[in-house]
Amino acid sequence: MEFESDLFVSYAHIDDQALVEGQKGWISNLHRALEIRLAQLLGKQPKIWRDPKLQGNDVFSDKLLDRLAQVGLLVSVLSPRYVNSDWCTRELREFFKASESSGGARVGDKIRVFKVVKTQIPLEQHPSELQQVLGYDFFIVDPETGRARELSQSSGPDDSRQYWARLDDLAHDITEALGLLEAASPGTGTGTGAVAGGESGAVSARAGDSPIVFLAETTFDLKSERDSIKRELQGHGYRVLPDRPLPLIAPEAEALVTDDLARCQLSVHLVGRNYGIVPEGATESMVVLQNELAIGRGQAEDFLRLIWIPPGLGTEDERQRRFIESLQNDPRIQQGADILETSLEDFKSAIHKKLEPEEEEEEEEESAGAAAGDLDDDDLCRIYVICDQRDLDHTLALEDYLYDQGFEVTVPVFEGDEAQVRKDHEENLVICDAILFYYGAGNELWLRRKLREMQKSAAFGRTKPLRAKAIYVAPPATPQKRRVRTREALVIPQQQDFEPSALAPFLQHLQD
């Protein structure tokens, strides 16, 4: 059906009172920003309705009820005042009732109510109709004090960035829901009965074209990282589960996660410094529970698991320390999983590699082959010299020598778009035959990070083993460099000017 308003913003009047006289209130700023972003995404001006004159002594009129029946979507802005307001909670209930005359409270796999949480409120205090609805949290919790603070457009740089990211998530999801409503209107060939009021787990036609990804709920310290991954996956057209809050009772949580995992080809797990909530009736945290259920799901051939641990992660929680150690050392947990300790952007790239169809990978390989002059891999040996940007000039003599010996030599790119630089690095890790780490200006953490990237090159698409790996320990001399030793690569100490004979062991490995 045709709606008079695309969107109705339901809020408590006090939440739009500005703290500083003369400025706009929080709700007014949200309304304006959402209106602009939706117009950009829709390509037309959205019809957003809210009542700026709402007063506590106003009468809930039949006129308002009639108008709610002409609204496509509802945005409920939750705050302590909202959940204690008879008016606000009635608006919510009446919208659900009114939606029955326009196809039901769901359209496709989307609920027609969007929950914006302005101020942190315990889930059990949310209106019962919204407790199983994923919210858009416009607040963050300080990890040191445990105190929540609201995000706004005028916050500091980091808080402001998070505000706009979450508003963008909200706008994209509203845009998708409006598209489903339009497709469900009579005359489009879909019909409201075909998509509305169905099971909450129904997969939309769009989601059926691409894999469904299980993005495990994580602890609050990694919420921004999870939101970033979710945003990127949805931007590429993937459906992301779970699409509702996980129950805090263990059997119910297990049933929901098991059902969601059964519909996915990939599960993604983020591990932070906090242990997290332990559901009632369980002995392990929700993060551990989801990982264990994914291990069980992983017995199927069509299922993959990716686990991310931020580099240098530390924790003071002994339970979390034991969990991280088990991820790193337990063969049962590692089976069928890629455990990556890389940057978040590199981890995102690994996710996309797992999700890309094999046909696309083959096309990329053919394209790369054509660009290289269709040379046979047996005729060309590629050495990837990984160095810090400050060492580019110092590697010239080494590069020239290797090239004169008949090798194709590649070094990292440091200038240009960040995503393209990262993609080039990953492709070099995939196609090279040998890696030579030039350990000069970089510190010990740099070397460790680069070694981990080499270890995880399979996540970027590498299928064959490296023929040789070496660490060229270059000047300046440091105590850390004198103690370099590893079984993962040949160590070549060279604390003087470049001497070709030092590379003999490395080149011998390439010839073996």
Image (spheres, rainbow, N blue to C red):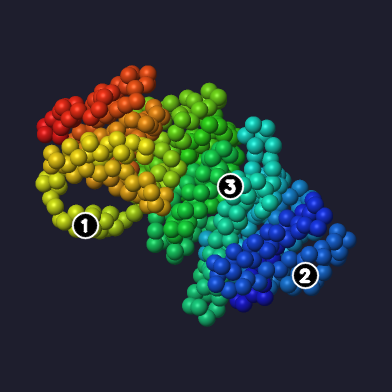
Question: For the point 21% across and 57% down, which residue is it?
Answer: 371
Which numbered circle lies on residue 245? 3
User: Quarter of the image containing the C terminus?
Assistant: top left
Question: For the point 44% across and 64% down, which residue is it?
Answer: 206
Front one among 19 and 190: 19
Q: CA distance from mark 2 to mark 1?
A: 65 Å
Question: For the point 50% across and 56% down, which residue is it?
Answer: 201
- Label 2: few (<14), some (14–19) or many (≥20) C-alpha neighbours in 10 Å: few
Which numbered circle lies on residue 266? none
Residue 77 position by quadrant:
bottom right
**From the viewer's perspective, is the residue at label 1 or at label 3 nearer?**
1
Q: Which residue is mark 1?
A: 371
Asked whether the viewer can see residue 115, the reply is yes
Image position, residue 185 (x, y; %): 56, 75
Asked whether the viewer can see residue 99, the reply is no
Question: For the point 64% across and 43% down, which residue is it?
Answer: 140
Image position, residue 220 (x, y; %): 58, 39
Image position, residue 431 (x, y; %): 24, 46
Q: Which residue is mark 2?
A: 64
Seen in the picture, residue 57 relative to 480 is either above or below; the reply is below
Amino acid type at mark 1? Ala
- Asked if labels 3 and 2 touch by Cβ distance under 8 angstroms, the answer is no
Image position, residue 218 (x, y; %): 53, 40
For label 1, the SS is: helix
Sequence order check, earlier mark of 1 and 3:
3
Amino acid type at mark 2? Leu
- Label 1: few (<14), some (14–19) or many (≥20) C-alpha neighbours in 10 Å: few
Most distant residue in the right direction: 57
Sequence order check, earlier mark of 2 and 1:
2
